[in-house]
Amino acid sequence: MLVDLHMHTAVSSPCSQIDPQLLIEVASRIGLDAICVTEHEEMEGAEVTRRLGAEAGYPVFRGVEVYTELGDMLVFGLYRPKFPFQTPFAELLSEVREAGGVIIPCHPCRGSLGFHHIMGNERAEFLLANVDAIETRNGGSSPESNSAAEAYADRYGLPGTGGSDAHFLMQVGRCLTVFERDIDSEAQLVGEIKAGRCRAAYASEVESLKLSELWR
Ligand SMILES: [Zn+2]
Ligand SMILES: [Zn+2]
């Protein structure tokens, strides 16, 4: 099952140009089986897109991207309309754990610098001991940064996830997550990530994806 786990819509990300209705049409046309909308610090766009998806019979899962002092975190399985900007990581972590969700550092090695270099050894070890996966394929990051993130995932035994980080329709699906099993619900999505039954990919590595359809 092919899922783009990281995207922004114009509903609640002012930095994005993506209309949620068009997003669903494009995602299904290029061969993504589901998408996750992950706005910055709020969930309205995810909620709006989920409802449109339900009407169209296309699975849309809700997530959020929260800025913490240890970098941006993708969160799935914790639902609330808004999160404060720069939520302390430890606070977010305890809420995620209470809700049974997952927390995933996204585009963690931009500039290909490692966690330890960016935040110091102690904080890096704390972070890596407490996250459920690492985003190792981010559409907005360089191949070097993605490879650096992947090396961390390997070293720490964490699953890798992928997402386009799309802010424009043409960017949808450029990175994605391949799940071993079909996913019908947000709870299942969280469960599959926790179980590590997924891998991150570039669009070019997935034959069934038809990115050329973006140009139609
Ligand atoms: Zn980000
Ligand atoms: Zn993002």
Image: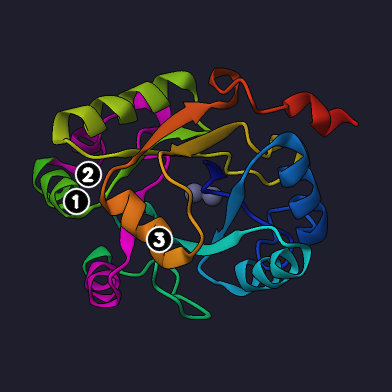
The percent position of residue 24, horizontal first and vertical second, equals 75, 53
* Residue 178 placement (x, y as % from top left): 47, 36
Report, in whole angstroms, how far the alpha carbon at label 2 lies from the one at label 3: 32 Å
Q: From the viewer's perspective, is residue 179 above or below residue 81? A: above
Residue 173's place in the image compared with 103, above or below, is: above
Calculate the distance from the C-alpha at mark 2 to the C-alpha at mark 1. Answer: 10 Å
* Residue occupying the far front of the picture: 182
Residue highlighted by disc 2: 119
| SS under mark 3 | helix
Question: Which residue is disc 3 drawn over?
Answer: 188
* Residue indicated by mark 1: 127
* SS for callout 1: helix
Q: Is residue 44 magenta?
A: no
Residues at discs 2 and 3 in contact (Cβ within 8 Å)? no
Q: Is residue 109 visible?
A: yes
Q: Position of residue 211 (x, y in %)?
A: 73, 27
For the record, the magenta segment spans: 91-120
Q: Quadrant of residue 38?
A: bottom right
- Circle 1: residue type: Leu
